[in-house]
Image (spheres, rainbow, N blue to C red):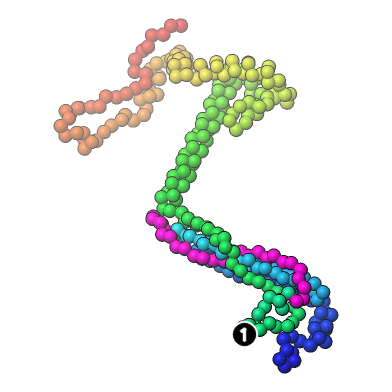
Amino acid sequence: MDDGGYCAEQQEIDEYFSTNHGLLFLSINLQQYNYETLEFEQIKKTEQFAFEEVSPFHAQVVIQKQQTTIDNGILFSNLEQYEVIKDFRVNTQTISSKFAEKTVISADGSKLQFDSLCSFGFRIDNKLGLEVILMPKLGEVLAQIGSIVNVIMLLKIFSNIINTTILESTLLDEIIEIYYPQFKQVQITRNVLGKVKQVHYKGVQIKMKTFKPKYNQLLDIARIKFTYNNLIQELSRIQMILIHQIGMENIKNIFKNGEDLQFLESDRLSNSPKEQEFEKFALFDQEFPFSQ
């Protein structure tokens, strides 16, 4: 610059604008809370402006402040307040090269004479943003853990119900196969809940409206066969067959091969009467009348 001047010589200005520079950049550091480090970190925000000699402009930069309240107490509230620069916005407009000359006054009150290609005005927005950050309390964490445990228990109950349903269906199908051997060639496709979706017999798909009524009848019969009383009846029939085939005495000898249940003298309660010998148990210890 010349002595006492306010800018470069015109030749220097012409050489500057002859290059392909094109843009001006305005960068401001903002502050944002990091939930991982639990600290405020700086984030740089940049705005760009087209810079040409024939198009002077004025940019008004409005800085937005924010009041952040952090509650980082574990059991009780512990409030900490911070004021940070959250964001900024820019409003631009085209001006003449004499705009800054008419606006700026020197410290001694005298006016300066100069041309300007751009000017920036900064101000703080009169609207204050509010942000509240609440850290999880110990009680809330325990409540969430309890909710997770409840969900796990519900899933466990649900899985047990599904497993029980699948096991019951498998057992009932096996009972049906005992009385109807052809049923082994029936392939049943079920969903997760055990509902029948498709049925194939020897590779041929069967209509559901035809299969379901008959299958439900077979299931009812199989459930009756699977009841406790019916199982006792079936065991009684097996007992009768064994008696006819090998005789009652041979059956008694089979069960006598095992060791009797015995207790030590030290196991007896001190005030209980002493027995000479414990009673022996046998499954078939007497003759049972039966009808042929």
Task: Name the residue at 35% across, 25% down.
Answer: 256
Crowding near the residue tagged with mark 1, few <14, some 14–19, many ≥20 C-alpha atoms within 10 Å:
few
Task: Farthest residue to the bottom: give it.
Answer: 3
Q: Is residue 98 left or right of residue 172?
A: right
Residue 220 to residue 127: above or below: above
Task: Farthest residue to the left: give it.
Answer: 271
Taking the magenta stretch, the answer to whether it contains residue 173 is no
Residue 5 to residue 73: above or below: below
Q: Which amino acid type is shown beneath numbered disc 1?
A: Asp
**Which image quadrant is residue 290 in?**
top left
**Which image quadrant is residue 87 in?**
bottom right
Q: Which residue is mark 1?
A: 108
Task: Name the residue at 71% across, 91% down.
Answer: 4
Residue 148 location (% of width, % of height): 48, 44
Instruction: Give, as a single range, the part of the protein colored magenta.
Output: 73-98
Residue 204 to residue 150: above or below: above
Task: Name the residue at 68% across, 73% down.
Answer: 120
Of residues 287 and 48, the one drawn nearer to the viewer in this rendering: 48
Residue 288 to residue 76: above or below: above
**Which image quadrant is residue 272 in?**
top left
Residue 242 location (% of width, % of height): 45, 17
Residue 44 location (% of width, % of height): 63, 69
